[in-house]
Image (tube, rainbow, N blue to C red):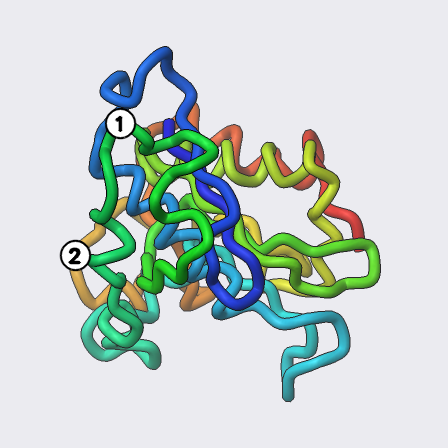
Amino acid sequence: MWGSIVNRDGFVCAVAYSGDARGDQWPGSRVISAQKANTATSFSLPAGKGGLFPGLALSTANLITQVQPGGSLYGLQFSNPVDTGVAYGGDPVAYGQANDPMVGHRIGGVNVFGGGVALYDSSGRVMGGLGVSGDTSCTDHNIGWKTRHRLKLDYVPNGLSARTDNIIYDYPSNNIGPPQRDISPSGFGHPMCDPPATAVGNALPVTDPVSH
């Protein structure tokens, strides 16, 4: 797996991988993890702020339905492009190390499937975002959520899933073709990847509950 953390302004703070070497996981997931982290912080709000849904936290898993053709957020995934100079600059030998070339730079990018969650401190302030990539998007979400819980940066004030930003599995079937907005009653559902990941995701508010 690859994992990245960005601050509230989208500057990359850390990049890491879980294998013994950087080639032990998908190389493309390095940038995806940073993109997910940027998305989560970019579209989440601090406690008490934000119109009809104050303090709304949106995980990347909450976005996939509404960015489909006809959805209210259609085109969002093209709105903030990745800075390719930041994403692919420097010596690949440093990728995933403390001196990863992305660190200290704004990555940009919008990702619209599971694996990115906003980081909240105990006052409900958005500290940044965490992104995970390297497995199915459903498993990425589960690992990102559990990692945030262990970092104690999960004081989520509000969300679309029982006041959390958990992944939502509400399709009557696992039809992933458009228009998904018509087959997800909540309008923010995510396609299922596999039954074990779905079971873990549904249980996250109990096994690894957020703090309000």
Instruction: Looking at this view, name the residue that lies furthest to the top.
Output: 20
Q: Is residue 152 visible?
A: yes
Q: Secondary structure at mark 2?
A: loop
- Give the position of the N terminus as an image quadrant: top left
On the image, numbered disc 1 is attached to which residue? 93
Q: Is residue 171 visible?
A: no
At 51% from the left and 53% from the top, the residue drawn is 6
Instruction: Looking at this view, name the residue that lies furthest to the bottom.
Output: 51
Q: Marks 1 and 2, how far apart in space?
A: 39 Å
Q: What amino acid is at disc 2?
A: Gly
Q: Secondary structure at mark 1?
A: helix
The answer to which of 154 and 204 lies nearer the viewer is 154
Percent across and percent down for residue 73 are 33, 77
In front: label 1 or label 2: 1
Percent across and percent down for residue 39 are 42, 61
* Image: 206 above or below 153: above
Within 10 Å of the Cα at label 2, are there few (<14), some (14-19), or many (20+) other Cα atoms? few
On the image, numbered disc 2 is attached to which residue? 177
Q: Is residue 52 left or right of residue 187?
A: right
| Residue 71 - label | none
